[in-house]
Image (cartoon, rainbow, N blue to C red):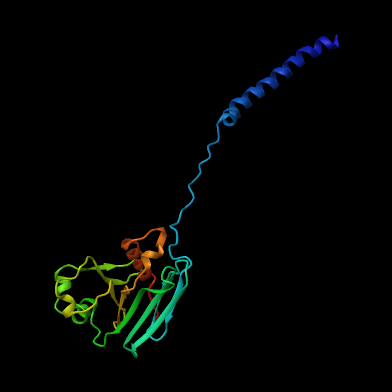
Amino acid sequence: MVVSKLIPSAIVTVLLVLGAGYVAWQQFGSLQATPVQLIFSPAATSSPDTTAGWKTYRNEKYGFEFQYPTLGTKVKIDENELVPGERLRVKIRHWVEKRNGYSGSFAMGIYSNPEHFDLETWFSKSVDIDNLLKNSHKYEDRKLDNGVEILAITKRPMPPGYFEVGGPVSEYYFMFPSRAYAGALERGQDNDLDSLGYAGATGADKVTELESQVLSTFKFTK
């Protein structure tokens, strides 16, 4: 019969199909069964900009600029050229509610350096005349992230008898790259920054941190 002749052929066909399927499973089944591993790289994080929202003071005549904070209150700038072309004082004043007025937060002083001394020499001739501060380790050399080299006060009080000889001192001193001017960042006697609660805290350490941040924004424009 025709049917009986077809059965072996059908069986052979089925076996061939099953064999081909088995071979395909051997070749590709393991690939399909392998789990896919996804590797996630952590997103790059950046340090918060502590000077975001600060304003910029710029002086074309003396060739410098720096940024200063508002600390969430009104700010007033007093600019006084004590000696034209030779001495400038820029005072940043913040509004203090408890005083109902402006308080001198800090001041930037600019002083002519006609002999073009380096910072150490200028400091010894203009500020630390008898080397009392350096000899008693009241100041130390530092370098800020913006490349500005400074002399920073390290501890108080000043040596006995210093004020009778040298007078008031600033927190930081620095030299312009051209050496035409030296600069100083100082606190006013009516300084009230700590009472403003800078960075959510009060105290001398936070005020010092703020001053360092101000100096780190200092740029020479000529």
Compare residues 101 and 31 and report the one nearer the observer: 101
Residue 207 versus residue 32 in the image, above or below: below
Compare residues 177 and 12 and report the one nearer the observer: 177
Q: Report x, y in % for residue 209.
A: 34, 63
Q: Report x, y in % for residue 66.
A: 40, 74
Residue 85 versus residue 2 in the image, above or below: below
Quadrant showing the N terminus: top right
The image quadrant of residue 127 is bottom left
Q: Report x, y in % for residue 92.
A: 40, 75
In the image, 27: left or right of 214? right
In the image, 156: left or right of 33? left
Q: Residue at x 49, y 50 (%)?
A: 43
Numbered label tally: 0
Compare residues 183 and 208 and report the one nearer the observer: 208
Compare residues 199 and 42 and report the one nearer the observer: 199
Q: Report x, y in % for residue 45.
A: 46, 53
Specify the farthest residue to the bottom. Answer: 84
The image quadrant of residue 14 is top right
Residue 163 versus residue 154 in the image, above or below: below
Quadrant showing the C terminus: bottom left
The image quadrant of residue 61 is bottom left
In the image, 95: left or right of 135? right
Q: Residue at x 22, y 80 (%)?
A: 122
